[in-house]
Amino acid sequence: RSAPVPPPRFVQELDVLVRARYPLVYLVTSEEQRLEAILSELADSHGKALLGWSVAKGFRREGGSKTAAALDGAKEPLAALAAIEKLSEPSLVVLKDFHPYLQDPAVVRALRELAHALKSTFTTVVLLSPTLVIPPEIEKEVSVLDVPLPSYRDLLQLLREIVGVVRQGNRAKVDLTKDDADQLIKAAQGLTLSEAENAFAKASARDGRLSKDDVPLVLEEKRQVIRKSGLLEYHPAEERLADVGGLDLLKAWLARRGAAFSDAARRFGLPEPKGLLLLGVQGCGKSLTAKAIAAQWRLPLLRLDMGRIFSGLVGSSEENLRRAIRVAE
């Protein structure tokens, strides 16, 4: 029997913070739905109520039961913070997209006072937001956790669930070996769970079949992620090595080293190729070769334009480069 899979590291860290009665925890993520499921399990394990707040709907209790009377109608940020302080039961309170209100000095002061008040209780406030905004007044009160994108194991579980649903409903034919599934999951890495679910569903709906031929389709879903970053360009894998003349030594190396991306190579301990420098005069085929390599290895091709990095139109050059690298990773 295999040992139980430990929870992700950030979940373990969050669990420690809740047990240590930290009053304010800031989770940086755009995956609300995924985090709600994680926080629900965490609240259950600690015997706490899970309450969610948004400016649109006010407070809602996980599980559908009625919220406490103190929370009714507390849609405004200041009223919400005041209501949290009146809670009588141990709770995890999730404030969704609260960062815009941290520009208001009154809200910042109220949050700071709430943090002091919660230190003697068993309630933790979780700020859930895709961007990190922490005013200096509350820097010392807040613990920040960056929520990583779904891991390989998360995407594998998602693919298994989708395959189960597809087979049960006879909606599409599933033609995947273990290596094919590995390629599909690798293609989906870097997507959120919701984006990956949409990509797998689109792949099976396109031709009524889920197979390794859908890898390029899953990679295409990344085009949206790259496009929204504003710093990188995504190039679809349309070229082939056969389109590149000569370079026989390079082609032989690409064919040989391409196998290093497989699961078998990882188990063997074979390192993946880290980089390739193409040097030559204009028009000799460097860009064409780069596109052909992406197609040969079934990997997405991202182009980083240094002119855009240093243009000053999107942000500071250093931050632009950091953002581009984060998106590529």
Image: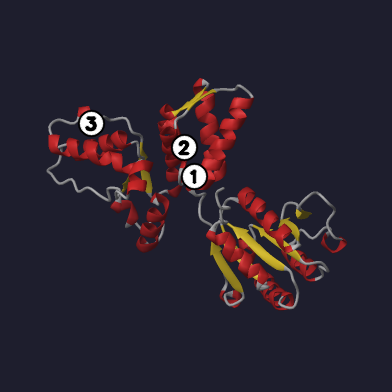
Nearer to us in this view, 300 or 58: 300
Residue at 30% x, 48% y: name it. Answer: 272
Is label 1 in contact with label 3 (beta carbons under 8 Å)?
no
Res 41 → quadrant: bottom right
Disc 2 marks a residue whose amino acid type is Glu
Distance from the alpha carbon under mark 1 to that under mark 3? 28 Å
- Please indicate, yes or no, whether residue 86 appears anywhere in the rendered image: yes
Nearer to us in this view, 127 or 227: 127
Mark found first going from the N terminus, 1 or 3: 1
Left or right: where 271 falls relative to 60:
left
Which residue does the numbered mark 3 point to in the structure image?
241
Which residue does the numbered mark 1 point to in the structure image?
191
Res 253 → quadrant: top left
Disc 1 marks a residue whose amino acid type is Leu
Which residue does the numbered mark 2 point to in the structure image?
221
- Please indicate, yes or no, whether residue 301 appears anywhere in the rendered image: no
